[in-house]
Amino acid sequence: MAKDHAKNLPALNSDATYTLGRTSHETTRLIEQSRIYGPSTERLCKRAGISEGMRVLEIGSGAGDVALMLAKRIGPTGQVVGVDVNADILDTARQRAADAGLQNTEFIAGDARNLDFSDKFDAVVGRFVLMYMANPPEAFANLMTHLKPGSIAAFQEPEYTLYPAVQHPDTPLMNQLIGWILDVFAHSGAHLDMGIGLYRAFVEAGLPPPTMHLESPIGAAKTWVGYRYMATIFESLLPLLEKYDLATAEEVGVDTLATRIRQEVNTSKRPFFLPLHVTAYSTLPA
Ligand SMILES: C[S@@+](CC[C@H](N)C(=O)[O-])C[C@H]1O[C@@H](n2cnc3c(N)ncnc32)[C@H](O)[C@@H]1O
């Protein structure tokens, strides 16, 4: 069984500052985020072949959304072990699993790079987590040691380096938001190219080249949830935007941001893009 590593964390000095903070607002934001990115995570897990009865390791669980989706996919005969370095947020994940009546899910506090299990897994899954680690390929290779031969690796990470491609002279607000996002993640030490970087992580760990997809939630409808979601991203980013002197609360204007984005979509007749992300999966040699 999994051991709890919360009291024995290694120094994380060279990792990124967790850009989005560790507030209760951030927990809510993660749950909202999952409503938008969840369908592509589900497609990833389905395409990758994660199925009933499997034992799955899920890293960087956050509020538990990926683990909950996996728990339903693998059913009562399978097991999901979720890991997060933030012990507090796992209380939310555990409560949500209990509320959903899921008994095949366990969450442990610890660093995903420093785990010790007596049983191996059939799959490892991670969403928006490798980008914060100092050396993602090394962390990824370490995770593979917890898998049986023939197991599945399925990851989803943002690709910020391509985000400026959607900037346009008619969308100054979207352009500004993209600029701030790139700046704040770069300052925090996060890997802006983690989506594309998944390829390197997979092949350096000895896996076959992964099957990859690039996606971005794009919206233009008046009622699209993405405008409000972008405002919640900025609410989480604000402390670091201010700390790094990139923007002030007045400049960002979180309270009116969703409305202003929707207005820009209206006037520019161009849809609004949320951050792009890459999904990648592959199977270990049998
Ligand atoms: C952006 S959140 C994503 C949460 C979740 N995967 C989701 O998509 O809803 C990243 C999470 O990874 C966790 N994390 C970052 N570095 C970690 C590490 N080395 N080991 C375990 N968890 C880590 C953070 O604490 C945070 O909860």
Image: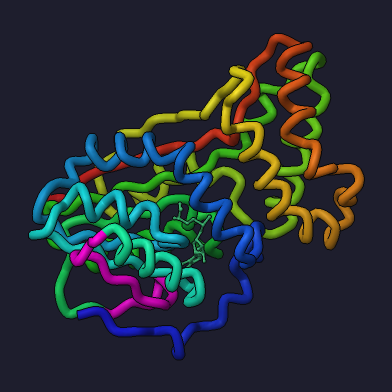
**Image coords of residue 230 (percent x, y):** 66, 39
Q: Quadrant of residue 46?
A: top left
Image quadrant in which the N terminus is located: bottom left
> The magenta stretch spans which residues?
101-116
Vertical position of residue 188 compared to residue 183: above or below = below
Q: In which quarter of the image is residue 167?
A: top right
Residue extending furthest toward the bottom: 7
Q: Is residue 121 left or right of residue 32?
A: left
**Image coords of residue 104 (percent x, y):** 19, 64
Q: In which quarter of the image is residue 162?
A: top right
Query: Residue at (53%, 42%) from the top-left corner?
Result: 158
**Image coords of residue 16 (percent x, y):** 62, 63
Query: Residue at (69%, 29%) from the top-left corner?
Result: 164
Vertical position of residue 183 compared to residue 44: above or below = below
Q: In this view, does 25 lie to the left or right of 60?
A: right
Q: Can residue 284 be seen in this view?
A: no
In reply to whether residue 112 is colored magenta, the answer given is yes
Which residue occupies the foreground of this view, 282 or 58?
58
Which residue occupies the foreground of this view, 222 or 174?
222
Vertical position of residue 284 compared to residue 4: above or below = above
Q: In this view, does 259 lie to the left or right of 82?
A: right
